Image (cartoon, grey):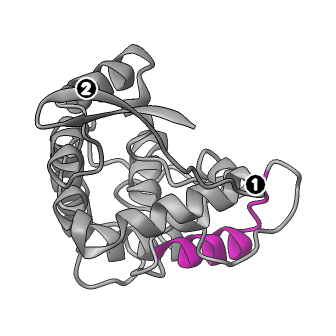
Amino acid sequence: METSEWYNGVKQVIKADFRAYDSYDDSIMDHNKLLSTSRYEAVRKCKDYKSACEAVYKCAYATDPDYAQKLIRLIEQYRLYEYDNECLNEAAADRDSEKIRKFQRLCNSLGIRDYQGKKLVEDNIIGPRTRSCIKKMPLLKRGSKGSAVSFVQSLVGAVPVDGDFGPITEGCVKDYQRRKGLKVDGIVGGGTWTSLVTT
């Protein structure tokens, strides 16, 4: 297949072999494996999409000297940055943490069901079924008690984790909201729940 590459600043059309995949999922998984290699470590350390675009070019992902700027334009044209905090599949799941599994267990224990009315599978993957439960979580504020409070305490660094939403927990929630750019009210509502679970 013909494709354009840049060598020493000169654009050349070459014939290149491209891999064909049996499915879209297979191609995404292979791409994830590529970006998880040591060669792309700098990309994984980036905190925003613009620096990631620059880094991926510097790691020799592409030869077009304008690659980073073209990629940034596409991201901004289609507002793809809105997906930065999404975890939609196993490859993007937080494998270093049991947070999602604990959230799924919490939902099941509270009787919160997904959009199909079913219990969640406790698989530590934040897919559509798990995401649908976030908006069903109870509003928590000072005076609230129970396992949902304990879950929040464990994520915002409140000590002790005792299931009692007191002034210490409220302060920790406010600190968390401030760091995440959320409304700082010390109340765990929809926006704070979404941030706690998905980021």
Q: Is residue 102 magenta?
A: yes
Residue 128 in view, yes or no: yes
Tell whether 68 sits left or right of 86: left
Query: Which residue is denoted by mark 2 in the rendering?
Result: 11
Tell whether 53 sits left or right of 195: left
CA gap between label 1 and label 2 equals: 31 Å
Q: Is residue 144 magenta?
A: no
- x and y percent of residue 130 in the render? 66, 58
Q: Amino acid at mark 1?
A: Ser
What secondary structure is marked by label 1?
loop
Q: Amino acid at mark 2?
A: Lys
Q: How many marks?
A: 2
- x and y percent of residue 80 in the render? 43, 29
What residue sits 47% from the left and 75% below the top?
A: 99
What residue sits 58% from the left and 77% below the top?
A: 101
Compare marks 1 and 2 and give the one earlier in the sequence: 2
Q: Decide: is 158 above or below 178.
A: below
